[in-house]
Image (cartoon, rainbow, N blue to C red):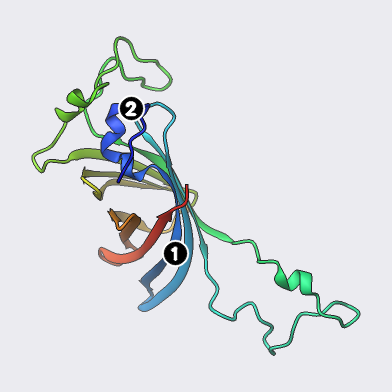
Amino acid sequence: MIEIDSSLPSELVPLSWLIGVWEGTGVISYPVDGQAREYEFGQRVSFSHDGTPFLNYSSTAWLLEPSGADAASDGSTAASADGSADADAASEPAEPQIFAAETGFWRLSRPRTDADPGPGMLPGVGPAPFTNVNAVETLRNAAGGFDIEVSILHPSGVSELYLGQVVGPRIDLVTDAVVRSANAKEHTASTRLYGLVDDHLLWAWDIVALGQPLTSHASARLARVQ
């Protein structure tokens, strides 16, 4: 059962099941130069809010080593300079090496009003709209869900703007635009799917990149840890 914080802005109620910190593992599989590249990874995802009608999103991911990869190539135990086993060093887990990160914002898609801030740092003027559940209900679409906008920024020089909808505990997203710096690798479109299944956050990400059509790229299963 999802408990909704009474202080949650009304516009975030349809997205409230995302709020929290999630951790788990996933799989990457994508063809590069005609060969499938496959990896397993760990991931930590956070959805939070600060009283404003949007969710703050962040994600970090690290590659998981194959079983036994930490062992010496000849099967020997790491030893100190005097020949004794360095038990302390061997027992300490290595820090995960982050290889992918994202940050962004999630919100309901609706027309902006004078009360909404912007452009830039201009504050809104007048009473805030959609401050109660009844007002938010007027935003439901023909499918019975809510249209949403998601912006995700990658440190690799790629920025994605997604449009989609949330219907109950399911979210479908399609890129409306992908902006790349001159030095970013080719990436022109994406779709993402999120769902809450047995109290776990499941997601799948397909991309159009490196000369490939829309192709399955990565997926993961995460458990709420906070």
Q: Position of residue 95 (x, y in %)?
A: 64, 61
Q: Earlier along the polypeptide chain: callout 2 or callout 1? A: 2
As helix, strand or loop, the secondary structure at mark 1 comes to: strand
Say few, some or many: other residues with alpha carbon within 10 Å of mark 2 (under 14 / 14 to 19 / 20 or more): some
Q: Amino acid at mark 2?
A: Pro
Q: Residue furthest left?
A: 142
Where 67 falls versus 182 (above or below)? Answer: below
**Residue 9: image tag:** 2
Q: Amino acid at mark 1?
A: Thr
Q: Nearer the viewer, residue 176 or 185?
A: 176
Q: Is residue 167 left or right of residue 19?
A: left
Q: Nearer the viewer, residue 67 or 27?
A: 67
**Residue 25: image tag:** 1
Q: Residue at x 29, y 11 (%)?
A: 127
CA distance for labels 2 and 1: 31 Å
Determine which quarter of the picture holds residue 108. Answer: top left
Q: Nearer the viewer, residue 193 or 168?
A: 168
Determine which quarter of the picture holds residue 217. Answer: bottom left
Where 182 falls versus 19 (above or below)? Answer: below
Where 200 falls versus 55 (above or below)? Answer: below
